[in-house]
Image (cartoon, helix red, strand yellow):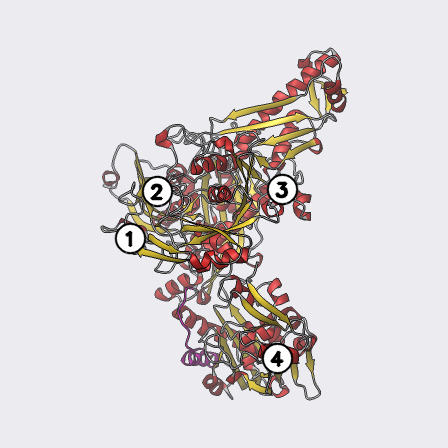
Amino acid sequence: MGVGKSLIRVDAREKASGTAKYVADLEPENALIAKVVRSTIANGIVKSFDIKEALAVPGVIKIVTCFDVPENKFPTPGHPWSTDTSHQDIADRNLLTKRVRIYGDDIAAVIAENEVAAQRAVRLIRVEYEEFTPMLSVEESLAEHASILHDDYPENILGHSSFHLGDVSYAEAVKEEGLVQIERVYETQAVQHCHLEVPHSFAYMEKGRVVVVSSTQIPHIVRRVIGQALSIPWGKVRVIKPYIGGGFGNKQEVLYEPLNAYLCTLVGGRCVKLELTREETMACTRTRHAIKYHLAAAVRKDGTLVGRTFRAYSNQGGYASHGHGIVANGANMFKQLYRDEKVLESESFTVYTNRSTAGAMRAYGIPQGAFATECLIEDLAHAIGMDPIEFRLKNCMKEGYVDPHNGITYYGGDALQECIAKGKEFIQWDAKRAEYRNQTGPVRRGVGMALFCYKTGVYPISLETAACRMILNQDGSMQLQMGAAEIGQGSDTVFTQMAAETTGISEDRIHIISEQDTDITPFDTGAYASRQSYVSGAAVKQTGELLKNKILNYAEFMLKRSAEEMDVRDNQIIDKATKAPLLAMEDLAVEAFYSLERSQHITAESTYQCKDNTFSTGAGFVEIEVDLPLGKIKILKIVNVHDSGRLLNPKLAEAQVHGGMSMGLGYALGEELLYDEKGRPQNDNLLDYKLPTAMDTPPLNVIFVERQDPTGPYGNKSLGEPPAIPQAPAIRNALLHATGLAFDSIPLGPEKLVKRFREEGLI
Amino acid sequence: MYDIGSIYLASDIQDAVAALNNNPVAEIISGGTDVLIKVRAGKQAGTELVSIAGIQALKGIERDGAGTIVIKPGTVFSHIVDNEIIRAYLPYLAEACDQVGGPQIRNMGTIGGNICNGVTSADSASVLYTLNAEMELTGAEGVRYVRMADWYQGPGRTVRKRNEVLTAIRIFQSEYEGFYGHYMKYGKRNAMEIAVLCCAALVKLSQDKTKVEELRMGYGVAGPNPLRCHKTEALAAGRVLNQELLDLVRKSVLDEVNPRSSFRASKEFRLQLIEELAERTLREAIGQAGGCHKCLKL
């Protein structure tokens, strides 16, 4: 009982048997269908619509265009609201837009009785545009006569930040004699989350309020944003989140719920369903930012990192979404993972363009930042002829590291060093580094690795708050109700284990309510930032202690013994000292409900505000084989080694790492959103967007270095996002080892490889 | 929900032909793995369909007394892959059919659809081309026969008229007897792929297994339609099995192909694959044929 055991997922049977309810299982059969009309240009202005023919399609109920909706901009990212206006998310989006900023922008919507009628109407709507040149790159958006995408940002720069660490400038520091300096440009691509369940919601009105059932990671935030978008009191909105088929950050965003809610208000509150297609999901929701990093570094021949400069340009796409926070997070990680003896200069830009809007995606800017960081570190080691692991050990994050800006501290001791040692042994680093030196021929092998560090939650940049409710039933079982969202990661299961650990009521008697309903569920900001087991977990612990105290107080009344001498273990009130059972929980509960003397419904509820944060760290190691003439990389062996604190559920933890590794492999080797020169998506489907299949996935190995985290409620810290970080740089570094060629961009797809191999005369 | 104007479920071949003649805009649907995608994308929305999926005479594989293998076009890929006749006589066709899409597509998609949609990336096409397969088309005016060499008429186009039904694919014994082959599909992934390039090689060796008696090289996505490299085949005939032969084939095929650039792959990359797959596919085919190991480090 409790944390640390591999309890079977509490939703395993429902999900495996198909009885778990998702949005599609709940929508009424007579729901009206809404379809978004999308722009067929990437940059311009809608001048007019011709909707006559579309309106004549039998079954079409209403067509709403961008000229019909109120001018009321709202923000969409899943962040806690800031009561300080200067820290509020950027509100740059309307329900429908006249100003077209991406190909497929939301310019009108059709409501119809069925899907075919809605599709027919969408195809029949004629649109007249004033078209501007699409700006797909940061460079184009920053050019002198670039069109302005948002009037509040006349230079198309959404965000800019910089910092300087050290007493000297980089230019000054590199005057030292004998330094080896390198300068590189590393580039990452836009990718998509590809959660199995597409964004899907339905909305109806009840008693003058709007109810939205949606596949989201952030139900309470969706409620607030719908209120903001429709200019109605937040209490007039009710959001229900059933089981969802994955999110990975794309649903840490308010996507189409406000439009869905608005459309339902236009048809007298009838239920309207808005389900995106896969193509719409890939092109018109959110992506992971493509970022270009201009880096320089200076190192002594003994391997001392003397200084680095970092300048990053993040391609935001058409709307702010999570905006500058993504590239800034990567800049922080660049700083945190290694020590510069003299100086670190850092500057980041986030720039609006006409590409699909970028937002949150698993690890929030760190996969990009880690790629750049770990390429640079590898190239530095290469430049001075030092073993890349030795070089990293000399300069990487160590026990007691404190981030100079936000105070986040590394409490892992030598866990990162141990992760490196374990990975090194697993991959047989020394032997393979020697064996694969100076290869020739068409098939070559290499080993590579990369480090990472990752925070846990968003404090102190943002608020961290979570609430939990526990209700004791007549039979001694309990309902556990969380504001935190189960999105497939297994949070319901570990919360159940935590509640068991703290209250002494066993998991089989804890009934967690998976669904969030903002009318009923306590508040939580939702599933993101690898925060829930840490922040919401602390709410479980705090609430569990409250509940246990109430139980013991009642036991004191019943048994006439001091509550302090008693405890709860395995559904029994026990003597703390002798562990002898004194009273069964069910007997206590039934008495508490029905006592003629003292009837008490034992419940507990509390809010936990987390004012702490902690680093997880780890390393990824890989051995690859490259088929040069075909440009194919085969993964021979891969392992993630994680310092993630105490494991709450080892099997679930391992599964979490497997999923992340698979995602990281796709990012490294094949996934990339492609656009033509007009900004039109070219591979917005799962045939041409190369998500790896089971046949592409090697055995995934996971090693944990388990250390109790002093700040985590159960010694735990982040593990949701870190698994997806190290694969791209590790594979790239293995490719350098195999071929002697440093590739500076991902994905490492065959065509890119073959082109370079030919240029360099390898084939 | 699919925007389908009408669908007629034909009971037999004559019924299908009649239905196609009665409705001048009707198109055939069989497994639906191409048609439904087009309907969903709005390209064929409101379409009028004649389904041949229920016609039993269009399903199955036979080998007659003359050794002719008849594949009925409504046979789905997974049934071809598992068929004993195919495994015994045309294992390379099974290899090709086993690489179409994913398991669900292979359970629905038919070999007839693969040939009739006219696309250059069709996995079964380059193999059927190396086998000089014969297509039987049945229309209102009767039956006609077309060899693979005369089948294609440009990207996505074949000689089949809208109101004709492909009723048999025939492979004659003389076209496969003594041949060994291999099919390679190059995709960016190992499954659920559309070919970036595909290559089929069929080879018949001399009795002592030291020379090529006859070679057939077929490609997909190396031009607007599946194609054969006849000049290379002629060059290889009678040659000793050695690296020189492979080098000759590698270079020679490049003169017979015409790949294009698309977002999926550039022309240059496809040319690299054409050359590389020529050697790898042929090497494997020669190995299957029991080619002299000493002559060709197999």
Q: CA distance from mark 1 to mark 4?
A: 56 Å
**What mark, if any, has residue A651 been given in the picture?**
3
- Examine the residues drawn in magenta and state their main secondary structure: helix
| Element on which disc 3 rests | helix
Quarter in which the N terminus of chain A is drawn: top right
| Residues at circles 3 and 1 in contact by the CB criterion of under 8 Å | no
Q: Are marks 3 and 1 on the same chain?
A: yes
**Residue identifier under label 2:** A302
Q: Give x and y (percent) for residue B132.
A: 56, 84
- Tell me, yes or no, if residue A718 can be seen here: yes
Earlier sequence position, callout 2 versus callout 3: 2
The chain holding disc 1 is A
Viewer-closest of B141 and A474? B141
Magenta range is B245-263
Q: CA distance from mark 2 to mark 3?
A: 42 Å
Q: Are marks 2 and 4 on the same chain?
A: no
Q: CA distance from mark 4 to mark 3?
A: 59 Å
**What mark, if any, has residue B17 been given in the picture?**
4
**Residue identifier under label 1:** A140
Mark nearer the viewer, 3 or 1: 1
